[in-house]
Amino acid sequence: MTTRTLTTDSATSAELSHLVDHHEVVDAVLRYTRALDLADADLMTSALTPDATVDLTPATAKIGLEFPVLTPRETVVGALVGAVGPLDTSHSVTNPRSEITGDTAVLTCYAQAMHFLPGQGPDPVQTRHALMMNRYTARLVRDGATWRIQHLSIDSAWFEGDPTVLVSQV
């Protein structure tokens, strides 16, 4: 297998455009997860199309929770910022792979998320938590110069802890 190292001299305009698009597609998912961590409705809104759908059911069903498919954007933002926002939470996104075709893209990645009840995350003796490793599959569209998530499906690779931490604010 041959590997190609891009330099500004060898990179074509199409290759550079693809790299920028990949970065911006990943950034949409990073905006979404950062919005969860900060309870930032405006940031989450910036990551989603008006008709966005977020489907957590593949992940939540595995841990015994019922959570509806969320759509459109206002419902997604209200439900998720309301449920996850109050928690002490952090999301780490890894292994992003994108397939970009024109103004549409599919991104797959992992998102590990740690959740504690409000105010309990910094407590070193706190053991009640919900730690999840989720597989994200996002369909995105280009909206002007910004990529936005149109459909996000979240499935659980594994889970540790107490699932009720996730619904304690609902």
Image: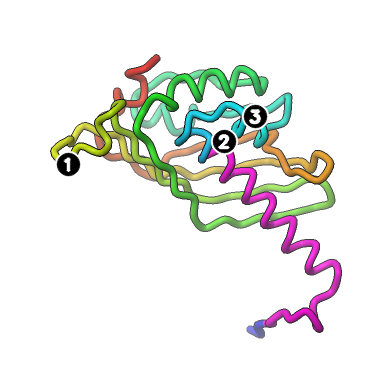
Is residue 140 left or right of 158 when viewed as pictured? right
Mark 2–mark 3 Cα distance, whole angstroms, equals 17 Å
> Looking at this rendering, what residue extends furthest in the top direction?
170
Lower sequence index among marks 3 and 1: 3
Residue 77 location, quadrant: top right
The span picked out in magenta is 4-33
Residue designated by label 1: 124
> Looking at this rendering, what residue extends furthest in the left direction?
125
State the residue at coordinates (51%, 40%): 34
Q: How many marks overall?
A: 3
State the residue at coordinates (80%, 52%): 101
Residue designated by label 3: 45
| Quadrant housing the N terminus | bottom right
Q: Position of residue 9 (x, y in %)?
A: 81, 83
Lower sequence index among marks 2 and 3: 3
**Kind of residue sitting beneath label 3:** Thr
State the residue at coordinates (34%, 40%): 114
Lower sequence index among marks 2 and 1: 1
Q: Do residues under tags 2 and 3 come within 8 Å of each other at their CB atoms?
A: no
Residue designated by label 2: 153
Q: Position of residue 139 (x, y in %)?
A: 68, 41
Task: Report the front residue among 136 and 84.
Answer: 84
Mark 2–mark 1 Cα distance, whole angstroms, equals 33 Å
**Kind of residue sitting beneath label 1:** Pro
